[in-house]
């Protein structure tokens, strides 16, 4: 949405360049809207001429009533046109700005939705949420206030300056000297405004990320007695955010103060010159004939209008700084490499054939190559993947489930290559029990199995040993747990996900640490249920540190520490 009028804005600044690219789809429509925005202050020149003519005629004699009515009507007509144009232009720019921000938000959501769950370049969810929900809206005032104000500054003062020089070279010289000083000082202050806005945006994202992290670990924090330390940490972060916000406000007030100082001096000097000239106390500053009363009034009315666009630009100066800070963050996010989710991610018919799995030469690049041994998993087998933390157990499960694509090697499932054409059909045959559980917005019943009967859910919960978890919830299956499963522990959330997997009757069950965070008795019960599924013909693939569970599987794969080759 950038026009040629703003090309002087940071040509060598990557954030400014990215901001132009972000807003580049509606350039033609915005040029028309900004052109309309420039007309109202130009129409004020016409109104000023009408007012000057009326007062000059009143001072020189008694004008006729019809003439006064006509001139007053002309003044009101121009005023109505001014108001209408300004209202229409503001409404048009606002609609375009909001549509552009909505499009940017949709594009960003679509991009991140296509990212594989275990992509190492995945951004922090809290920082991303703040960017989507709050920070992108800072582009709206930049488009609706700063850009139109910049265009007015480039057109209106120059027009008034030409008229001022035409009537009096002295008035034109006053405006010519005082006017350029304002953008010079604004540019100097703007450097501080940019830095302050960047710090403020960074503090907002950091504070939200910290809040999400503390919510995730709230139970552990309370058990460790670290609540006071957590509160103190948030207090310090909130104080830092307050300080950065006040810094932005101080810069904004400083910008306005600089503008008002030079504007007041310029208007005062014009008023002094015009007054002394009309009183015939000075005899210079005009071309041939001294100023008339009408010309003096006209210049007095134009002097504040000369500085008005600069006032608007000063008021919107911090909007530009905030928008550039957001553009810089958006640019950094888009620069992150994207490991897309294989397939379309939508519903698909189940892939036919025995759910056998075969892998050869799998490698994932995480800065250093992470290689996996070749696998041959027959239908109905049970495989335990063990190894130290960071050895790639979760990543291997993600590859086998079709949630990530390898950088090298091949995976064959049900006798067919696992690629974008088969991934959706393969995932339709799977049940996935992740280590980090996330719930959808809705009731627990909706998360477990929408449309399932009470008897079906009771059977699945019983086999996953999760009945007690549901019974102690305030509304049972109608309870909303929130995204992070507030109200249940990590082990309880995993048992609920196991119940969902059991109800789905999958051909292949892939589970990441299914017995973690469980007491020995419950872990043993979950192990028995997993073995029962395996005996029913379900192919079972688990990643675990639980050697008791691993030893009950028919096969076991030990992954070496990251960076070491498998033996």
Image: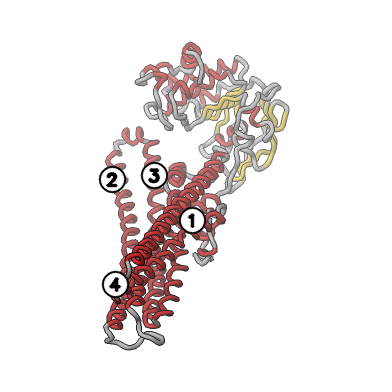
Which residue position holds label 2?
A: 232
**Place of residue 271 in the rendered image (x, y in percent of width and height, measured from the top left):** 30, 76
- Mark 4: few, some, or many residues within 10 Å (few <14, many ≥20)? few
Which residue position holds label 1?
A: 328
Q: Which mark is residue 62?
A: 4
- Which residue is more in the foreground, 343 or 407? 343
Structural distance between the alpha carbons of marks 1 and 4: 63 Å
- Of mark 1 and mark 4, the one earlier in the sequence is 4
Structural distance between the alpha carbons of marks 1 and 3: 19 Å
- Of mark 3 and mark 2, the one earlier in the sequence is 3
- Mark 1: few, some, or many residues within 10 Å (few <14, many ≥20)? many
Is 34 positioned to the left or the right of 173 in the image? right
Circles 1 and 3: CB atoms closer than 8 Å: no
* Residue appearing at x 31%, y 45% in the figure: 234
**Place of residue 36 in the rendered image (x, y in percent of width and height, measured from the top left):** 48, 58
- Which residue is more in the foreground, 6 or 434? 6
Structural distance between the alpha carbons of marks 3 and 2: 16 Å
Q: Nearer the viewer, mark 1 or mark 4?
A: 4
Residue 80 vertical position relative to residue 348 in the rendered view, above or below: below
Residue 559, picture quadrant: top right
**Place of residue 443 in the rendered image (x, y in percent of width and height, measured from the top left):** 43, 24
Which residue position holds label 3?
A: 208
Structural distance between the alpha carbons of marks 1 and 2: 31 Å
- Mark 3: few, some, or many residues within 10 Å (few <14, many ≥20)? some
- Of mark 3 and mark 4, the one earlier in the sequence is 4
- Of mark 1 and mark 2, the one earlier in the sequence is 2
- Which residue is more in the foreground, 554 or 52? 52
Identify the element where label 2 is drawn.
helix
* Residue appearing at x 49%, y 31% in the figure: 435
Residue 303 visible somewhere in the drawing: no
Identify the element where label 3 is drawn.
helix
Residue 378 vertical position relative to residue 31 in the rendered view, above or below: above
């Amino acid at each position: 949405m950038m026009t040629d009028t703003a090309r002087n804005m940071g040509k060598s600044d990557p954030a400014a360049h990215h901001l132009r690219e972000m807003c580049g789809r509606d350039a033609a429509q915005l040029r028309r809207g900004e052109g309309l925005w420039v007309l109202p202050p130009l129409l004020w020149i016409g109104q000023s001429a009408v007012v000057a003519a009326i007062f000059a005629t009143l001072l020189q004699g008694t004008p006729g009533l019809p003439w006064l009515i006509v001139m007053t009507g002309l003044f009101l007509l121009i005023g109505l046109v001014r108001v209408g144009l300004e209202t229409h232009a503001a409404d048009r720019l606002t609609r375009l700005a909001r549509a552009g921000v909505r499009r940017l938000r949709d594009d960003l959501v679509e991009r991140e939705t296509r990212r594989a769950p275990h992509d190492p370049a995945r951004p922090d969810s809290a920082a991303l949420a703040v960017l989507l929900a709050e920070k992108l809206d800072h582009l709206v005032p930049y488009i609706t206030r700063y850009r139109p104000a910049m265009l007015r500054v480039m057109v209106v003062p120059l027009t008034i300056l030409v008229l001022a020089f035409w009537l009096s070279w002295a008035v034109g010289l006053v405006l010519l000297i005082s006017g350029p000083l304002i953008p010079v000082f604004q540019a100097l202050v703007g450097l501080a405004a940019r830095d302050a806005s960047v710090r403020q945006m960074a503090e907002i994202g950091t504070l939200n990320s910290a809040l999400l992290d503390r919510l995730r670990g709230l139970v552990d924090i309370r058990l460790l007695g670290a609540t006071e330390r957590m509160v103190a940490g948030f207090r310090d972060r909130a104080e830092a955010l307050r300080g950065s916000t006040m810094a932005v406000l101080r810069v904004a007030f400083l910008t306005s103060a600089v503008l008002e100082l030079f504007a007041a001096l310029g208007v005062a000097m014009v008023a002094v010159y015009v007054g002394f000239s009309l009183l015939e106390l000075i005899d210079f500053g005009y071309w041939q004939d001294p100023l008339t009363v009408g010309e003096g009034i006209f210049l007095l009315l134009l002097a504040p209008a000369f500085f008005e666009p600069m006032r608007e630009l000063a008021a919107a100066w911090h909007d530009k700084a905030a928008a550039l800070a957001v553009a810089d963050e958006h640019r950094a996010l888009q620069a992150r490499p994207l490991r897309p989710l294989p397939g379309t991610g939508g519903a698909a018919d189940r892939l036919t054939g025995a759910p056998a799995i075969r892998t050869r030469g799998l490698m994932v690049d995480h800065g250093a190559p992470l290689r996996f041994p070749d696998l041959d998993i027959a239908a109905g087998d049970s495989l335990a993947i063990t190894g130290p933390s960071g050895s790639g157990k979760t990543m291997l499960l993600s590859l086998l489930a079709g949630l990530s694509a390898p950088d090298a090697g091949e995976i064959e499932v049900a006798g067919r290559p696992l690629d974008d054409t088969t991934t959706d059909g393969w995932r339709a045959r799977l049940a996935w029990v992740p280590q980090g559980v996330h719930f959808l917005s809705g009731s627990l019943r909706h998360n477990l199995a929408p449309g399932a009967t009470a008897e079906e859910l009771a059977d699945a919960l019983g086999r996953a040993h999760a009945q007690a978890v549901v019974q102690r919830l305030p509304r049972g299956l109608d309870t909303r747990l929130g995204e992070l499963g507030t109200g249940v522990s990590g082990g309880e959330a995993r048992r609920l996900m196991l119940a969902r997997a059991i109800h789905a009757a999958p051909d292949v069950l892939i589970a990441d640490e299914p017995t973690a965070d469980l007491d020995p008795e419950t872990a043993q019960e979950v192990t028995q249920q997993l073995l029962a599924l395996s005996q029913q013909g379900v192919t079972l693939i688990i990643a675990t540190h639980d050697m008791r569970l691993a030893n009950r599987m028919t096969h076991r794969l030990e992954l070496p520490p990251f960076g070491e080759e498998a033996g």
